[in-house]
Amino acid sequence: MRRLITNLKNIWSVEELRQRIILTLGLVLAYRIGSFVILPGISYAALEASSAGSSDAQKGIENLLSLFSGGGFTNASIMALGIMPYISASIIMQLLGMAVPSVQKLQNEGESGRKVINNYTRILTIVICALQAPSYLKMYVEQKGALPDDPSMFWWFQTVIILVAGSMFAVWLGERITEKGIGNGISLLIAVGILSRLPGAFIAEMGKSFEAGNLIKLVLELIIFAMIILSVILIVQGVRRIPLNTAKSVVGNRSVVGQQTRNYLPLKVNASGVMPIIFAQAILTIPMTIFLSATDPKNQGGVVQRILSDPYGLWYNIILVVMIVVFTYFYTAIMINPRKISEDLKKSGGFIPGVKPGEDTANYIDNLITRITFPGSLFLAAVAIIPAIAKIAGVNDSFAMFFGGTSLLIMVGVVLDTVQQIETYLLNRQMDGLMEGTRVRGRRGANELSGF
């Protein structure tokens, strides 16, 4: 406890860090307030009444779709679309970077190219929002009976504009946090939206346990929840270090040639992060959204609807596991280029002991990445289906979603990244770090290469 108080004092004593934290909290508060501002003309009472009568499968779909908007989706707020359109646009731009030479050229132009790509991403975000906004109003809000009586064309136009503006405002908040605050803004907004649902979900689960008189089950759930978080941290932090020899070292401002030093090339076990789960769930969300809007779910969709409209069903999770494994390899191939790593090593005079520079080094790294990606993909798949297992074990829907899946990975990743940035500020001012005695991601030794 004393160490915690000392760390808080150290954080507050650093003026730049204090200002960044205050600004971040203010922008996050603005985002949270926006998620509760209801669209003009929408009947919130009708939304609540309709949601109360929804089936368990529909509630599960709604909770999943509302995950990235901090509840804005189910509230029909001005930020109902949340950050997801921007994430979708970013994914599309990354894919174009693999297939379109002009986008590849921009990616290789450094800061100037990154700014151009960011502008294209924002424009694409507006286009995606303009397409999603009418669909959201028609396929969700109207089916809930929450639209105003006989809405005019002007109402439709202004509401679509508000939804687009709300989503772009959320993107602006995220970019300002990244630039002038602490942490990755977009990821932080998503994590805050997810965490905001945790207290209510836990209280609901606790009330359920009290009613059943089974407090032992609640204690076991919390222990299992803590163990899952620890295992996620272990895998997220896990790296495979490839030993490297460099033919020169830097002493002061001079480069000393002929003196070999030992460094490491870290390859993350989970290099793709949470993106494979987002990919897979985004694709499966499309038919889920269609089935959610069906006026008579029992007679529409048939077998396909029963499979894809239940996020806790067996076949849904089997399909999800297969897609996550495939997308993990796909996204890892986008993130890590063994040939480029080999070229960078050759230019810097570094080499892997026992492996020839050039093509042999690229093949060696590629084979190693392939081997460590497989267990990483299985881990992601296992984390993704834990909520379904928790639901089968009797955990309520809202609390079961925190046992794994995208929500848990995002929360763990964002917390670790934010803690690392705060720790960096403290260490740069020769203060004690937040996580002394542990290996926080990014806090590596001086002999470990992290620029690849």
Image (cartoon, rainbow, N blue to C red):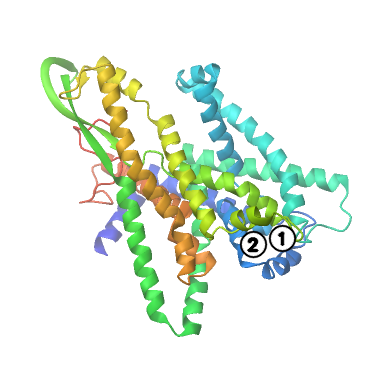
User: Can you give x and y, in whole percent of width and height, for residue 167 in the image?
Assistant: 64, 43
Q: Distance between the residues labelled 1 and 2?
A: 10 Å
User: Can you give x and y, in whole percent of width and height, for residue 211 in the image?
Assistant: 50, 84
Lateral position of residue 84 relative to residue 419, left or right: right
Q: Is residue 350 above or below residue 422?
A: above
Residue type at mark 1?
Pro
Q: Please say if the residues under marks 1 and 2 sit with CB atoms less than 8 Å apart.
A: yes
Disc 1 crowd rating (10 Å Cα; few below 14, some 14-19, many 20+) is: some
Look at the numbered disc 2 and give the secondary structure of its residue. helix
Residue type at mark 2?
Gln
- Of 322 and 96, nearer the camera is 322
- Of 149 and 339, nearer the camera is 339
Instruction: Identify the residue under disc 1.
Output: 297
Residue at 44% across, 57% down: 404
Residue 262, quarter of the rendered image:
top left
Instruction: Identify the residue under disc 2.
Output: 58
Residue at 40% across, 34% down: 332
Residue 359, quarter of the rendered image:
top left
Lateral position of residue 398 relative to residue 341, left or right: right
Task: Residue lying at the far front in this picture: please name it.
Answer: 303
Lateral position of residue 118 relative to residue 156, left or right: left
Lateral position of residue 400 relative to residue 30, left or right: left
Q: In this view, does 292 lie above or below 369?
A: below
Look at the numbered disc 1 and give the secondary structure of its residue. helix
